[in-house]
């Protein structure tokens, strides 16, 4: 029997990469008849289990710690594999050259070792000393590097990697199962007063991080409120970041939470199911992201928004490049709350026309990047 293994964070860990892996594994189950195993991060009081049914999940490494003995032993005992696929984020697997040694040892237990780089660092990024050297050595240790965007692909190429060692597979898109549910029921299920459903709902879902541009979001909403009194802004998610950054985030939230009318907060981690309900209950999604200089990634929240067919506005940053190529008119320069507000107000004045254009542009993208199609692309890459 063919066997595929993933090394990744995994639910219930509060982590976007873990959610990504869960969606990918679910889709693979529908198109792959072999055995799938996930070597997950270790969480207290959670042991070996099946999740979903038929997929064995074996806790094997500590998130953020370069200690891989348990993972190697667990993989050895269950090997050999056709493919071992690592879902990489810098915060999950620190000390890059120790990580490379771990990857080289994995080769004993699989025909192919594949890695997805959820974040590609620019050559001038200071996070890793000599990032070009690291990426080149990475390409020599693994058989294939998966990235999500054209910017990531060609950044690696400019650093000297061969394009034959890189495959671009987009982030998957889930069609939101709640998009046909009544707005008032969704609002009530999230714990809000039913009256919120009578407003135009704007939202920014996901983790509360400094690069999400919360201060820009609040300034944008203030401008919208000067013109429209029928809008409400829902801000959701748990804080994420280093301690010094968290303090700044909390000050921003406390300031605007106290002083800005019609801003509603959900100050906790939302499950994927809750995020889907929130997006389905929204009229416009706002993603006022800041530039993450020297980093290239894509937004999982963007894919949830597009799979919900909710008009989304954003800033011109690499993380949103896939959508920018489809609807450039719905984007503002980073930090420009005045332009973002103007775009939102224009949408509200011409909602039917904008939505028609949006739907026509986004529908083929959602179909092309469905998780089933993304799973098939992975299998093609594994076995080509």
Image (tube, rainbow, N blue to C red):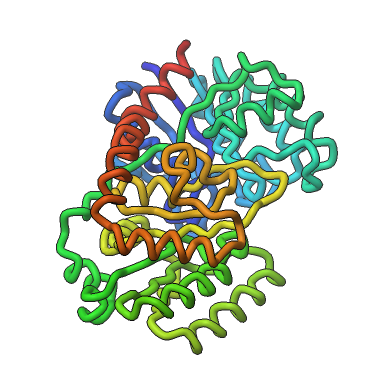
Residue 243 lies in quadrant: bottom right
Which residue does the image show at 21% across and 55% down from the upper left? 178
For this orientation, the residue located farthest to the right is 129
Residue 109 seen anywhere in this rendered image of the structure: no
Residue 157 seen anywhere in this rendered image of the structure: yes
For this orientation, the residue located farthest to the top is 384
Percent position of residue 44, x then y: 51, 59
Q: Quadrant of the N terminus?
A: top left
Percent position of residue 11, x then y: 43, 51
User: Considering depth in this image, is 225 or 74 the residue closer to the camera?
Assistant: 225
Percent position of residue 114, x then y: 56, 25
Which residue does the image show at 71% across and 27% down from the upper left? 138
Where 160 falls versus 209 (above or below)?
A: above
Where 85 falls versus 243 (above or below)?
A: above
In the displayed structure image, the side of residue 235 where residue 367 appears, left or right? left
Residue 27 lies in quadrant: top left
User: Considering depth in this image, is 204 or 338 the residue closer to the camera?
Assistant: 338
Q: How many marks?
A: 0
Where 13 falls versus 150 (above or below)?
A: below
Percent position of residue 134, x then y: 77, 31
Which residue does the image show at 84% across and 36% down from the upper left? 130
In the displayed structure image, the side of residue 281 where residue 143 appears, left or right? right
Which residue does the image show at 75% across and 21% down from the upper left? 160
């Amino acid at each position: 029997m063919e066997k595929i293994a993933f090394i990744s964070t995994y639910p219930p860990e509060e982590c976007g990469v873990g959610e990504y892996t869960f969606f990918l594994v679910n889709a693979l189950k529908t198109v792959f008849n072999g055995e799938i195993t996930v070597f997950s991060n270790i969480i207290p009081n959670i042991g070996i289990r099946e999740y979903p049914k038929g997929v064995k999940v074996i806790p094997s490494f500590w998130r953020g710690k370069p200690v891989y003995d348990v993972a190697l032993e667990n993989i050895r005992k269950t090997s050999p594999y056709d493919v071992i696929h690592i879902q990489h984020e810098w915060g999950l697997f620190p000390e890059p050259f120790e990580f490379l040694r771990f990857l080289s040892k994995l080769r004993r237990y699989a025909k192919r070792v594949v890695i997805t780089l959820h974040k590609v660092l620019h050559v001038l990024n200071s996070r890793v000393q000599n990032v070009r050297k690291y990426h080149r050595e990475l390409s020599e240790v693994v058989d294939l590097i998966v990235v999500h965007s054209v910017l990531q692909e060609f950044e690696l190429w400019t650093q000297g990697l061969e394009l034959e060692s890189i495959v671009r597979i987009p982030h998957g898109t889930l069609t939101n199962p709640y998009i046909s549910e009544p707005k008032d029921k969704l609002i009530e299920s999230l714990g809000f007063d039913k009256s919120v459903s009578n407003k135009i709902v704007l939202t920014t879902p996901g983790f509360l991080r400094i690069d999400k541009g919360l201060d820009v979001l609040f300034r944008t909403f203030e401008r919208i409120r000067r013109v429209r009194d029928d809008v409400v802004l829902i801000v959701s998610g748990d804080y994420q970041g280093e301690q010094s950054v968290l303090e700044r985030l909390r000050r921003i939230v406390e300031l605007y939470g106290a002083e800005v009318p019609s801003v509603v907060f959900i100050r906790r981690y939302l499950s994927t199911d809750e995020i889907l309900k929130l997006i389905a209950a929204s009229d416009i999604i706002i993603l006022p992201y800041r530039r993450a200089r020297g980093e290239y990634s894509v937004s999982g929240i963007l894919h949830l928004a597009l799979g919900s067919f909710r008009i989304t506005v954003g800033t011109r940053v690499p993380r949103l490049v896939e959508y920018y190529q489809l609807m450039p008119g719905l984007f503002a320069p980073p930090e420009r709350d005045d332009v973002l507000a103007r775009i939102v107000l224009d949408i509200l004045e011409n909602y039917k026309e904008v939505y028609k254009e949006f739907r026509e542009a986004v529908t083929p993208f959602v179909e092309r990047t469905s998780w089933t199609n993304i799973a098939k692309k992975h299998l093609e890459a594994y076995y080509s």
